Image (cartoon, rainbow, N blue to C red):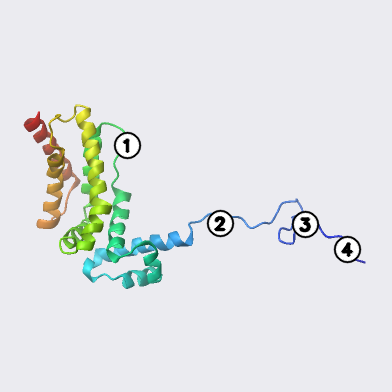
Amino acid sequence: MPSGKRSSVSPLKKKSPRGESHATAPHTGRPRSELARAALLETAYNMMKKHSLGEITTQGIAAKAGVSTATVYRWWDTKEALLVDAFLDVKSQNVQMAQSGSPLHRLREYFIAGGKFLQGEHGLVAARVLGAIQDDAKLREHFTERFYVPDLSEMMEVAKQAVDAGELPSKTDLSLFLDMPLGMCLARTLLRREPIRWQDSAAAFDIAVAGATSYWG
């Protein structure tokens, strides 16, 4: 006959013969929402490889990523914000400022990494983004806020460190100094639609350093 005594083992966590609990292991993968966000960024970037930014729609990105437009708007208010973040996501994976070493060397390596990034299809996407911001105020606002200002601020800070370390003359106009190698990239990418070689980025930076030393030294 049943004794009426309740088992001390929970029906949800039955013990194995060794006394180990069979409780469900916690999920260690990426949350579903993060996977959807990553899919949207990747899809948006891949679409920019093949289409002008004006041809891309929020609905089209969502459909190709396999999510709803509501999912898109969970993170981005506009298509422009998503496209800029997609570009920024890929750029940040390929171009990063070193956190140690000579400031001038770190800056040079950063420009070289940028030159390598702008080769091939990444350069095509960059050209499309830079061209589109001339006529699209929303895109220009997001690009400036999310990419240009933070990127320039980081380069400016390292350039100041180069001045403090005596690697650049104290009177160097740092904005003009940084504009020289950046200008080469823009001329090649936008005006002549020519591929950028990392050697060109290195040469442009070295010329800027030589010019700064000669003019402000």
Question: Dot 3 lies on which element?
Answer: loop
Question: Dot 2 lies on which element?
Answer: loop
Which one is closest to the eye, mark 3 or mark 4? 4
Measured Cα–Cα span from mark 4 to mark 1: 69 Å
Quarter occupied by the N terminus: bottom right
Measured Cα–Cα span from mark 3 to mark 2: 24 Å
Asked if the residue at tag 1 contacts the one at tag 4, i.e. Cβ–Cβ closer than 8 Å, the answer is: no
The image shows residue 156, relative to residue 166, as above or below, that is below
Q: Nearer the viewer, residue 45 or 161?
A: 161
In the rendered image, the residue lying farthest to the left is 215
- The label on residue 4 is 4
- The label on residue 27 is 2
Residue type for callout 3: Val
The image shows residue 46, relative to residue 202, as above or below, that is below
For marks 3 and 2, the one nearer the N-term is 3
Q: Residues within 10 Å of mark 2 (few under 14, many from 20)?
A: few
Dot 3 corresponds to which residue? 9
Residue found 23% across the figure and 58% down from its top = 141
For marks 1 and 3, the one nearer the N-term is 3
Asked if the residue at tag 4 contacts the one at tag 3, i.e. Cβ–Cβ closer than 8 Å, the answer is: no
Residue found 18% across the figure and 62% down from its top = 132
Asked if the residue at tag 2 contacts the one at tag 3, i.e. Cβ–Cβ closer than 8 Å, the answer is: no
For marks 3 and 4, the one nearer the N-term is 4
Question: Dot 1 lies on which element?
Answer: loop
Residue type for callout 1: Gln
The picture places residue 146, in percent across and down from the top left corner, at 28, 53
Q: Nearer the viewer, residue 51 or 200?
A: 51
Residue 174 in view of the camera: yes
